[in-house]
Amino acid sequence: MTAVSDQPRMGFFTDTSVCIGCKACEVACKEWNHVPDDGYAFLGQSYDNTGELSADTWRHVAFIEQPRADGDLRWLMSSDVCKHCTHAGCLDVCPTGALFRTEFGTVVVQEDICNGCGYCVPACPYGVIDQRKDDGRVWKCTLCYDRIGAGMQPACAKACPTESIQYGPLDELRERAHGRVADLVAAGVTDARLYGDDPDDGVGGTGAFFLLLDEPEVYGLPPDPVVPTRDLGLMWRRAALAAGTFVAAGVAAFAGRRGGR
Amino acid sequence: MKERSMVPRAEFSSYYGRPVLKKPVWAELDIAGYFFTGGVAAGSALLAAGADLTGRPSMRRSARLTSFAALGVSGVALVHDLGRPERFANMLRVMKPTSPMSVGSWLLTAFAAPAGVAAASELPVGRRLFGGLARPAGLAAAAVAPAIATYTAVLVCDTAVPSWHAAYPELPFVFAGSALAGSAGLSMLLSPVPENAPAARLALLGSALELVAAQRMEGRLGLVGEPYREGKAGAKLRASKALTVAGAVAAATLGRRSRLAAVAAGGMLAAASALTRFGVFEAGVASAEDPVYAVAPQRERVEQRERVTEARP
Ligand code: SF4
Ligand code: SF4
């Protein structure tokens, strides 16, 4: 990513160790961004009746009830969001240029350019971006592009009562997060780990990263996501070979015995 | 490239068994259907050029018309999936090499004009209009055809869908073989028997290419190869293989003598080509629906890395 100005890359640090599952983030996001309701489902999955991130859910709070060895229950709660990947599969494959990288380093859909082709949906290694069935266009977290442009923090971060969701320059957030993990581990919470903070991971690190207390897949997150376009050069090379084979087969079929018509 | 997973199914965790990925939102009939008709359009353009250059006028005529008709169906399918025709114009707003769909939209645009001229020149009105352009247009269409036949494999492989992404080394060959066999089959079905020899040979070559590539792919993929064998997708792909073998054998033997056999062989090969595309499409969707295919190979990679780190002093 090339910096166009001295605007630093902005992001989210979601520290799930202090999440209390109040869903203020989900609500604030819906209200600020006019995200339509997604039905009133009862999923029977703890306190989670939203289920997953979707076109109409841009923050999603996961609830996990884990039985512990001492017979007690451990609660894991985590507010998930678009990762605003450094190497974003959704953005790479978008054929219209509707998905773009903002001056804050975030990934945003321009709703007037999206043509509903749906390619970004299976290209996201986190299963974030999704289509609205009405006219087929796609929607996801914008990291409140309008608010941060006006110097405010995103609605979810503003609403979060425990500072589980923190917004700021990515560098600062990463530093703070490393300190937080160290503190937690020192205090005996040895499960604490960061997810998405590593610029060398399969998506080049994420603009929205997390502190988790268990393996990512327990929260419904992929343990080692890779941007699909990482292998695109190899894919085109294989396709070129296959295209060559296609021509060679044609030539061979007609070059056969001329008399054999 | 190594996707074989040693993580047993039972050991993988998930969030209430929910998918980790969003499955493709494309309508199967539109998009798998387009992969088939697009392949037929490309293969037929190749056959038409060959027929033109080797003096087989009936075969040339039917192949040019088939190619353009298949392209027309492709266009309808693509626009139907987008919802409105003018949305296709958005595809041509930019040219983005990182988006196989953008590349494909430009390829289709580059293919449509010459394929249209070549087809039109086979009709009385068109012959008067573009008589002299027929051969150059036919050859131009054939020059773009190999890309049309194979880019659709890159299109699906360039996603996070586990069974598609992992298949990228072989899937372009599967699609190329399927396009050749399907279009050769249709050519046999539509051309007079005395002009069938090249199509019969191409049917054999295309079938062999498809079958060998598919075999290698499924053998290599390990856990994420499962969706290609199981359920509806597996059934379609097995049917496709059986029809491919039967069609190729019939094409190579009786198809060069008997009209009836040529029609039967052609029908089987075309059906097989369609079944391959629908089967591959469904296998991908199935692999996105079950979190095991996303999580288990990734977990295996993480553990592999941890083992390497631990082994270091
Ligand atoms: S998480 Fe998915 S939707 Fe968000 S930026 Fe990354 S690839 Fe795009
Ligand atoms: S659905 Fe819209 S945002 Fe997504 S790839 Fe297509 S044009 Fe781009």
Image (cartoon, coloured by chain):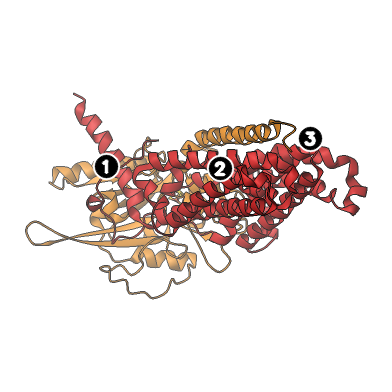
Of the two numbered discs 3 and 1 in the rendering, the one whose residue sits closer to the viewer:
3
Distance from Cα at disc 3 to Cα at disc 1: 53 Å
Residue occupied by mark 1: B6
Q: Secondary structure at mark 2?
A: helix
The residue shown at (33%, 70%) is A49
Distance from Cα at disc 2 to Cα at disc 3: 24 Å
Residue occupied by mark 3: B53
The residue shown at (45%, 68%) is A31
Residue occupied by mark 2: B207
The residue shown at (76%, 51%) is B65
Distance from Cα at disc 2 to Cα at disc 1: 33 Å
Q: Position of residue A192 (x, y in %)?
A: 21, 47
Tell me the chain of label 1.
Answer: B
In the rendered image of the structure, the colour used to display chain B is red
Q: Going by the picture, which residue comes out furthest to the top?
A: B313
Tell me the chain of label 2.
Answer: B
Q: Secondary structure at mark 1?
A: loop
Amino acid type assigned to the residue bearing label 1 in the image:
Met
Q: Quadrant of the N terminus of chain B?
A: top left
Q: Secondary structure at mark 3?
A: helix
User: Taking the image as drawn, is residue A15 in sight?
Assistant: yes
Q: Position of residue B265 (x, y in %)?
A: 61, 51
Q: Nearer the viewer, residue B288 or B195?
A: B195
Q: Position of residue A174 (x, y in %)?
A: 33, 41
Q: Quadrant of the C terminus of chain B?
A: top left
Q: Nearer the viewer, residue B154 or B184?
A: B184
